[in-house]
Amino acid sequence: MEPETRKLQAGLMYRRRRPVTMALLSEVKVWRDALRALRGMSRQSAVASVTSGLICGLVMFVFCVVFSEMIFGQHELLMRAVPLGVGTQTMTTMIGALVFARFSGCRAVIAGPDINPMVFLAEAAKTIMTVLLTLTLPLTPTLTQS
């Protein structure tokens, strides 16, 4: 490979990595500033903020458990998926809360699962299980009474 080609490729690689590096550095600066703001608070204010965050997190986790039970708890075949639903909803709630907290202009942000989509998902799961059971019932052997 010619030296000019190597220089061009090295320059392109540097340009590709630079925006990512700059974005990461700016994110680190934002989180450091947030920690400095927490350190600058009075003890009472910091305890109140942390306690508020823990209580909101606990409430969101309870919502995740209840909504997962609404979706997967309707039939015994789906009951095994309840823990998977709880984990999935908890992770998406945590990711959503972090993204909303980072990019929101408001300093007080609460993000979590919503009841409206859960009602639709629960009804969809119920309908799917009803259809699957009606399709598989004729295929299962029946007990005859003597």
Image: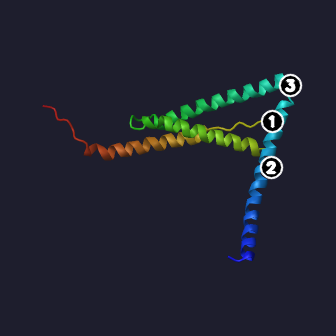
SS category of the residue bearing label 3: loop
Report which residue position mark 2 lands on.
Answer: 26
Residue type (three-letter) at the residue carrying disc 2: Ser
Relative to 142, 69 lies left or right: right
- Tell me which corner region of the image, top left, top right, bottom left or bottom right, holds residue 62: top right
Residue type (three-letter) at the residue carrying disc 3: Ser
Way the structure is coloured:
rainbow
Separation of marks 3 and 1 at Cα, in angstroms: 13 Å
Report which residue position mark 3 lands on.
Answer: 42
Circle on res. 50: none
x, y percentage for residue 48?
78, 24
Q: Residues within 10 Å of mark 1 (few under 14, many from 20)?
A: few
* Residue under the point 74% across and 37% down: 109
Q: Residues within 10 Å of mark 2 (few under 14, many from 20)?
A: few
- Give the foreground label among 3 and 1: 1
* Residue under the point 29% across and 43% down: 137
* Residue under the point 72% across and 43% down: 100
Report which residue position mark 1 lands on.
Answer: 35
Residue type (three-letter) at the residue carrying disc 1: Leu
